Amino acid sequence: MAPYALIAAALLLPWTPARIVIPTAVAATAVGGFVIGPWWIVLVAVMGGGIALSMSFAIRSGQLRDELSAAEDRIATLAVAAERERIARDLHDILGHSLTAVVVKAGLVVRLAESQPDLARENMAEVEEIARTALSDVRATATGFRQVRLATELAGARSVLAAADISATTPEALPPLSDQLSEFFGWVVREGVTNVVRHSGARHCTISVSAESVTITDDGPHHCPYEIGNGLTGLTERADQLGARVTVSAAEPHGTTLVATAQGDPR
């Protein structure tokens, strides 16, 4: 009866106890055969144990295949969710900045339309270029090829701040940065300058960059007017991916300071 009992154990027991119970039962049956019965009892016990262990291995392999398939399905679902979050975050950052620039420059065009029509036309051409760039960025974001660089964002920040009648102090030269850190700092400048234009009421904005941090300070009349909305939340998520940190605090004597600090430049 030993082979039947061992096969039943292989079918009914989970893998962890089965791999202990079956060899133990084979050893006990074999010892009993040596002691009380003919030699073929030992042979039958060993054959039954081999069949039972083979069945246990086969059953466990099937379970592992099922678990692997389920894990792959979960990973695929999480990947889709992560991609949706990336697209939503990037679209918010891109369109928020671009539309803010369009609004600011359009307001400037309205003010200049009668007194300085040539300058108004020049700014209107810039509005068109911003809109075209935003459209291109949206398409690139949807396909995952959107590239942001710190130097490019600093140039755009100067233009947007000037159109909003906010004087700016920006670095004349940038330290060597990896592509990963340059992209992250570019997003920081984009989001920070957008908040300065939208919410601060500032007359001056200072942007400073080091090898491990970027700081944006405005002289707005209030301390920390920024609400933690989608923009800052998305920026924090980007920072978490790099092991970096983003903080918003009150500046002295008034205004707001946004600081993004990386834990070393990941090269």
Image: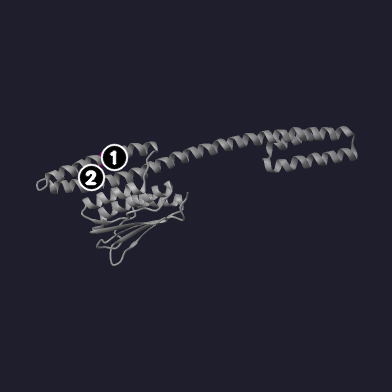
Q: Let me know if residue 212 appears in the view.
A: yes
User: Would residue 131 be counted in the magenta stretch?
Assistant: yes
Q: Residues within 10 Å of mark 1 (few under 14, many from 20)?
A: some
* Residue at 33% over, 60% down: 257
Q: Nearer the viewer, mark 1 or mark 2?
A: 1
Q: Could you tell me which residue is drawn at 72 percent across and 38 percent down?
A: 9
Q: Who is closer to the viewer here, 127 or 3?
A: 127
Numbered disc 1: secondary structure = helix
Residue ID at (9%, 48%) = 115
Residue 22 position, x and y percent, is: 75, 39
| 23 sits to left or right of 245 | right
**In this picture, which residue range is highlighted in magenta?**
130-135
Single out the residue that lies furthest toward the front: 173
Q: Quadrant of the N terminus?
A: top right
Dot 2 amino acid type: Val
Q: Nearer the viewer, residue 82 or 204?
A: 204
Please provide percent x and percent y for residue 20.
Answer: 73, 43
Amino acid at pointer 1: Thr
Majority SS type along the magenta span = helix
Give the quarter of the image for residue 221.
bottom left
Q: Which residue is mark 2?
A: 102
